[in-house]
Image (cartoon, rainbow, N blue to C red):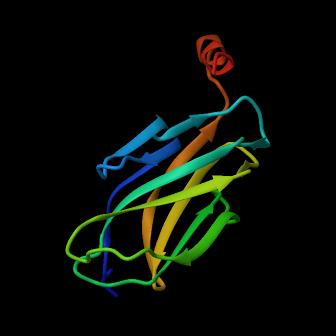
Amino acid sequence: MTASFNIRNALVCDDARREMNGKSILIGVYNDVIVLPQFPFIVVPKLVFYMVVNPLGNKFSTVEFRMTDSAGNKVFEISGGLSPYDPSESMPIVIQAVGLTFASAGTYTMELALDGTKVAAGDITARLPKSPQEQQQLAAT
């Protein structure tokens, strides 16, 4: 089955805000790795998944987001309704995960579904610091 939408961008960050002029402000953007001080680790206060979706002219009413660990176990899941949008333009979808727990080091996979149609949204690797310099940088945050 061909996806009826695509994800143009998917980022993981500490916070995302929308300005009155429509611009987004992303704070604390992670690359493909998130370095944590220990496992298990509970992210406080939140981790934000910011995705720009091209609906390819389609109207959707529901959104689901899911994150799984490397063994396929569900780590986080949320669903809800979509706000009205113009199907001819890309739209931001912002998911806030409060109290998300990284149980162990490894790759965590994200998936987005609109009206039940699922699309891979990328992945992020969680790991411990590899050097004293990374440990110091982590302690400074």
Q: Residue lying farthest front?
A: 20
- Percent x, y for residue 14? 55, 40
On the rendered structure, is 74 left or right of 29? right
Q: Residue visible at 70% across and 65% down?
A: 73
- Percent x, y for residue 109? 54, 58
How many marks do you count on the picture? 0
On the rendered structure, is 27 left or right of 40? left
On the rendered structure, is 86 left or right of 33? left
- Residue 13 is at least partly visible in this image: no
Q: Report the quarter where the C terminus lies.
A: top right
Task: Give the vertical position of 16 relative to 52 (above or below).
Answer: above
- Percent x, y for residue 113? 47, 76
Which picture quadrant has residue 51? bottom left
Q: Residue visible at 67% across and 30% down?
A: 128
- Residue 27 is at least partly visible in this image: yes
- Percent x, y for residue 54? 28, 69
Task: Give the vertical position of 24 relative to 119 (above or below).
Answer: above
In the image shown, does 9 or 33 lie closer to the viewer? 9
In the image shown, does 18 or 93 lie closer to the viewer? 18
Q: Residue visible at 48% across and 46% down?
A: 16
Q: Report the quarter where the N terminus lies.
A: bottom left
Q: Residue visible at 53% across and 43% down?
A: 15
Task: Give the vertical position of 127 relative to 89 (above or below).
Answer: above
Which picture quadrant has residue 87? bottom left
